[in-house]
Amino acid sequence: MTSSSFDPHALLAESRLGVLATIKADGRPQLSPVTPFYDRDAGLLHVSMTEGRAKTANLRRDPRATLEVTSADGWGWATVEGVATLVGPGTDPNGPEVDALVGYYRAAAGEHPDWHEYRRVMVDDRRVLMTMTVEHVYGARIR
């Protein structure tokens, strides 16, 4: 039995662990655990990822993506589908690519104790910000 009062948007907003599905060159899904941040008001989903990883390469080739999150008790789930854009990696710790990652961090986690270090690590790790325009959200609570 599903709950008619279940709000998949609320589950997406509170979840900090999800599985991102991208499309491999052969058409099969590539699944990756990620830490998403869902901005319900803006209709955007953000994920920080690393250049050179399969999910990043897949999104550069085909920007369609799907993310699934599950409630802590395992009885609820929410899925979001959309088209992603990627920003980065940046080479300048004070450049716009790293500024985008700072904005993501602030929205998702608040203030960092050492922004200088954070910015340096984002460049060193070749971090990329994925922003997905949310096209469709669905989910259910079965218990």
Image (spheres, helix red, strand yellow):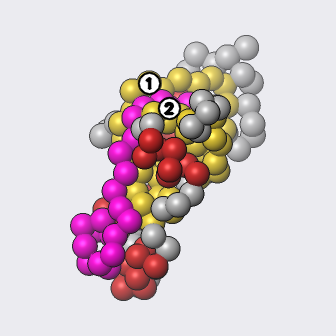
Residue 80 marker: 2
Whether residue 114 is situated above or below residue 20 in the rendered picture: below
Magenta span covers which residues? 78-99
* Residue 133, x across and y down, in percent: 35, 36
Q: Mark 2–mark 1 contact, CB under 8 Å?
A: yes
* Residue 100, x across and y down, in percent: 31, 62
Whether residue 105 is situated above or below residue 1 in the rendered picture: below
Residue type at numbered disc 1: His
Which element is circle 1 on?
Answer: strand
The quarter of the picture where residue 63 lies is top left
Query: Which tag, 2 or 1, sits closer to the chain's start?
Result: 2
Instruction: Find disc 1 in the rendering and name its residue.
Output: 136
Q: Along the line of sight, which residue is nearer the eye, 3 or 63?
A: 63
The quarter of the picture where residue 110 lies is bottom left
The quarter of the picture where residue 126 lies is bottom left
Residue type at numbered disc 2: Val
Residue 56 magenta-highlighted: no
**In the picture, which quadrant includes the N terminus?**
top right
